[in-house]
Image (cartoon, rainbow, N blue to C red):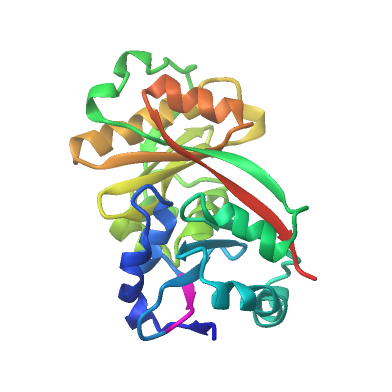
Amino acid sequence: MISELEKSEYYKCRELIYEEGLLEAEAVIEGSHPGRIFVDDIISPTAGFIWLGSNNGFIFIGNEENEEFNFELYDFFNTVIKHDANKLGLTAFEAIGNHSKWNDTFKKVFGENVKGYNQRVYELKKTDYRKQNEPVIEQGYEVIKITKDIIENKGYVSFENIDFLRSKILEFWKSFEKFLEYGIGYIVVYDNEIVSICFSGVVAGNVHAIDIETLKCHQGKKLGQKVAHFFVNECIENNITPYWDCMEINTASVSVAENVGFKNKFNYIWYSVSFE
């Protein structure tokens, strides 16, 4: 029987995490990020899935060959999970295996026609960092560290589009306070407008996953590369490991990561599944 764990019981899933698995799974289990965990056995779980706080992503953990658990999955998702997902306006979800053996299970449970997308995960070691590749950006652009005053739009300058920054942070974090406690980040500003953001989207231990976005009208000016270097510099100074997760077809993101010095650690596939 599939049951939901209380947050105080998330520690029971630590042994189900694969060493080269997704950072988000560790972050939810550690408690630094929001999420819900469902397992086959609340006393001694052997398989389960994590519903990420970003709502549409599900990371499957543990034994992918647990027949009783797998037999229940389809109906559980199309009744219990679908009911809660519909309240959030979701008609589909992303299924991700914490290890690649889940891929075959997804097809058996949700159908052979589920569409898969290739994803790459990069990490950066201090010795691989390419400081020499930090670009010079056009005059008028300025890189600023994200602080409480920046988020609250206080201080010597206020930004016309502060909601761009606030909404990005709240995509990943339960609150601004949680972000400021665990994460770091930088923005690029131009004419009192935030035009590029690079910050810790997920944190587990000393590993920080980067989320980065540049407004479309300011793309092509190497702002993403510039702000990524500021982020990486702070990571290196504080013995933090930067982590970069992007779609394989996102060549611009792959290019920035590799230009900064990130090395491909592993790849995975995520599946788009529609509720029945």
Residue 182 lies in quadrant: bottom left
Q: Is residue 30 visible?
A: no
Q: Does residue 264 lie above or below 18 as drawn?
A: above
Residue 132 lies in quadrant: top left
Q: Which residues are magenta?
A: 35-41
Q: Position of residue 23 (x, y in %)?
A: 40, 52
Residue at 58 percent across and 26 percent down: it is: 252
Q: Does residue 146 lie above or below 263 as drawn?
A: below
Residue at 60 percent across and 60 percent down: it is: 105
* Between 248 and 144, the one nearer to me in the picture: 248
* Between 264 and 148, the one nearer to me in the picture: 264
Q: Position of residue 177 (x, y in %)?
A: 36, 64
- Direction from residue 133 to residue 96 in the image, left or right: right
Q: Is residue 214 visible?
A: yes
- Direction from residue 223 to residue 129 in the image, left or right: left
Q: Main secondary structure of the magenta part?
A: strand
Residue at 60 percent across and 50 percent down: it is: 270
Judge whether residue 37 is colored magenta: yes
Residue at 50 percent across and 60 percent down: it is: 170
Quadrant containing the N terminus is bottom right
Q: Position of residue 168 (x, y in %)?
A: 53, 52
Judge whether residue 260 is colored magenta: no
Q: Does residue 229 lie above or below 93 as drawn?
A: above
Q: Position of residue 107 (x, y in %)?
A: 68, 57
* Between 198 and 91, the one nearer to me in the picture: 91
Quadrant containing the C terminus is bottom right
